[in-house]
Image: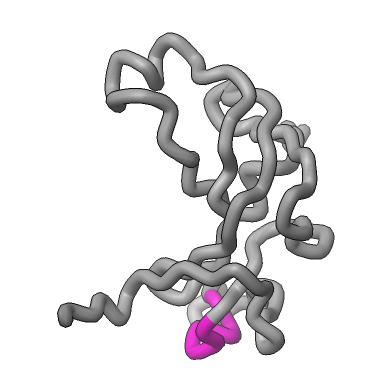
Amino acid sequence: MSYDASYSEFFELPANWSRGQWGENADGDRQLINDADPFKWSGEGQPPKLGASVTVYLNGMGTGRVLKYFAEHGWLGVLVQLDRNPAWRKSQLKGNPPAHIFGRELEPRQLVQS
């Protein structure tokens, strides 16, 4: 049996999930403060529940349902079965496999004005 420590899937939200927390290092560069946490969520809100209907804003993927949770390299995400597979995705993947989506990808993009 092989095991990939950098990727796991779950049918329950890990109890010890946390939000990614950012700060500045001594040089003033942005850095992840809680890098060692195993299940960091990048979204502003709570991770959606299994079966929840969500909108995936990333690349205009659209709506779908949450099937599972996954963790990859310490970041928590959701596997979403899209209601309608975009044409660009159909050309890249066979069928309509669930999409691996991280928290920020479930939020509308906000442009920062300077």
Q: Position of residue 57 (x, y in %)?
A: 66, 31
Looking at the image, residue 99 lies above or below residue 91:
below
Task: Name the image quarter holding residue 33.
Answer: bottom right
Task: Name the image quarter holding residue 80.
Answer: top right
Of residue 4 and residue 26, the one placed in the foreground of this image is: 4
Q: Please state the extent of the stretch shown in magenta in the rendering.
A: 32-38
Scheme by which the image is coloured:
one colour
Q: Is residue 114 visible?
A: no
Looking at the image, residue 15 lies above or below residue 84:
below
In the image as oriented, which residue stretches furthest toward the left? 1
Determine whether, in the image, residue 36 is placed left or right of residue 21: left
Q: Position of residue 100 (x, y in %)?
A: 48, 48
The residue at 66%/48% (across/down) is: 66
Quarter of the image with the C terminus is top right
Q: Position of residue 47 (x, y in %)?
A: 74, 62
Looking at the image, residue 23 lies above or below residue 78:
below
The residue at 69%/80% (across/down) is: 18
In the image as oriented, which residue stretches furthest toward the top? 87
Q: Position of residue 92 (x, y in %)?
A: 28, 22
Please tell me whether residue 90 belongs to the stretch shown in magenta: no
The residue at 37%/17% (across/down) is: 90
Determine whether, in the image, residue 28 is placed left or right of residue 88: right
Looking at the image, residue 29 lies above or below residue 33:
above
Quarter of the image with the N terminus is bottom left
Please tell me whether residue 33 belongs to the stretch shown in magenta: yes
Q: Is residue 23 visible?
A: yes
Please identify the dominant SS of the magenta region: loop
The residue at 39%/14% (across/down) is: 88
